[in-house]
Amino acid sequence: MLVSFLNSNFLLALTTLVVGGFAIYLYLKQKKDKKRDAARLILQEIRYAEQQIRKYREFKQYQLSDRLLPTNSWNDNIHLFINDLKETEIDLISNFYAKASYIDIMIRKISDWKTQPKIPTTIMPSFPTQFQPSATAQPVPSAPEKKEIFYFFDPMEETQKILYEVSMNVEFIFNTPVVEKLRKIASKKWYDLV
């Protein structure tokens, strides 16, 4: 009786230990899988954004339909890499994402302006003064003429300048040691828990 009691408690403890160990393994595996998948997505985003910026530097134009960062996985997953990257490395990636996001904003502004209907602007010229002979000789304004003015300059010129400056100052990071660390995380095998 004592032996069967010990055997049943031993089997129960062993089963609990195996199930608990398996649950911990699954938890750690899911955590690593999420980190690995986030690293892969971040690598893809950096590669694509750099490719678009390189094209801009060559041709001086972005496609208005494109976005450098269709998704911003870095901001959503930065917490996963706090223990793997140094503060300066995190700052480097964050700076790249900030500039790429800003470029996206500038592209969207230009696109919005180019797609809105253009309405000629009517302006009122200043009132020229005329002198009429009188004792007091006060100027009398003549009736103003309305003129339609069509602008031949680009109202988005300042936005284009900012876009140029930011695009030319983006530091490429895809072939740096910090991104190499992300590549190592992204290439970990499913059985690596460390």
Image: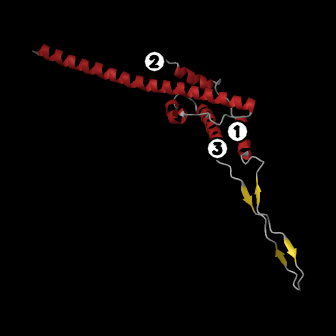
- The picture places residue 106, in percent across and down from the top left corner, at 66, 42
Foreground pick, 184 / 60 = 60
Give the residue type at disc 2: Asp
Disc 1 versus disc 3: distance between alpha carbons?
Answer: 23 Å
- Residue 91, picture quadrant: top right
For the residue pair 177 and 39, the one nearer the viewer reads as 39
Measure how far apart labels 2 and 1 are at the Cα level: 40 Å
* Residue at point 56%, 21% (across, down): 183
Q: Quadrant of residue 147?
A: bottom right
Residue that mark 2 sits on: 192
**Position of 4 compared to 19: left or right?**
left
Label annotation for residue 115:
3
Q: Locate residue 127, reporting x and y percent.
A: 80, 69
Residue 75, x across and y down, in percent: 54, 36
Mark 1 surroundings within 10 Å by alpha-carbon count, few (fewer than 14), some (14 through 19), many (20 or more): some
**Amino acid of disc 3:** Thr
Q: In whole angstroms, how far apart are the C-alphas of marks 3 and 2?
A: 51 Å
State which quarter of the image contains the N terminus: top left
Nearer the N terminus, badge 2 or badge 1? 1
Callout 1: helix, strand or loop? helix
Residue that carries the numbered disc 1 in the rendered image: 166
Q: Residue furthest left?
A: 1
Farthest residue, direction top: 3
Mark positioned earlier in the residue sequence (3 or 2): 3
Mark 3 or mark 2, whichever is nearer to me: 3
